[in-house]
Amino acid sequence: MHHRTVGELMTRNVVRAPRGMPFKEIVELLAENDVTAVPVVDASDRPIGVVSEDDLLRKSSGQADPSGRVPIPHLEAWERAKTEGTRAEELMSGPAVCARPEWTVVEAARLMAVQGVKRLPVVDETDKLLGIISRGDLLRIFLRHDDAIREEIERDVLRRTLRLAPSAVTAEVREGEVTLRGSVESRSLIPVIERLCRSVDGVVSVTEHIAYATDDTHG
């Protein structure tokens, strides 16, 4: 089975900010390129952080409301430092949480979830910036056509990997939702089939209606 990698899904022409870029120029950079965040890089083009609209808005939120209607929110020390920052390296969230181009969608998605970030700079083996991948990029695998998903399941999972006869188990795919029907010799094979099908790019869910001849799940 072929799983699309971060390198295949990432944006390669990355807009980036040098660490010394002033606040106003960062705002202009985001607006001109219609992006919400950019990696901040050092002199060797290695990401040291990411500066986003959220980071920049902290400067406004830390200022007093002229009308006096909204009190200044309580800020932690690091948040206060950002409100006083004027350059990219002072405003960014860091250190940069990065991905590698050979990673799978699952690896990148898990890192985003664990770190609570919306995008990952992608770096090579020397940590130089290659691209950037966002949550939207990861979701592109779910744009695969149902026929492509069904063909991969039947050809690569059921036939090549599990060596099942074409008539043993069939797959129906609608809107990424897979329904498996058929029969196999051993009951223990059913969760294996289900797990492998779930790993196919673009699969939203798997429902199985597979009968078995022998229950080998009990000692």
Image (spheres, grey):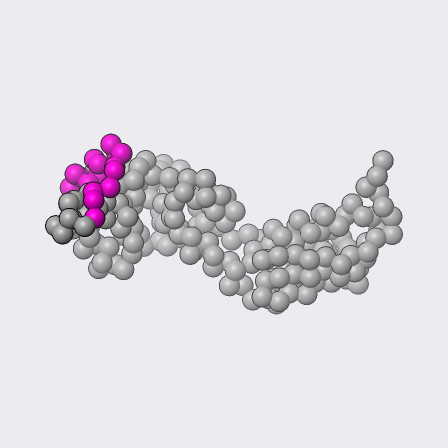
State left or right for residue 106 relative to residue 1.
left
Q: Residue at x 16, y 44 (%)?
A: 63
Q: Which residue is drawn at 41% across and 42% down?
A: 116
Image position, residue 59 (x, y; %): 19, 45
Can residue 42 be seen here? The reply is no
Image position, residue 108 (x, y; %): 46, 45
Q: Which residue is drawn at 52% across and 47% down?
A: 106
State left or right for residue 60 relative to residue 50.
left
> Farthest residue in the top direction?
77
> Farthest residue in the left direction?
66
Q: Which residue is drawn at 65% across and 54% down?
A: 197
Is 81 a magenta residue? yes
Residue 203 sits in quarter:
bottom right
Is 83 a magenta residue? yes
**Residue numbers of the magenta segment:** 70-86
> Farthest residue in the front direction?
69
Residue 205 sits in quarter:
bottom right
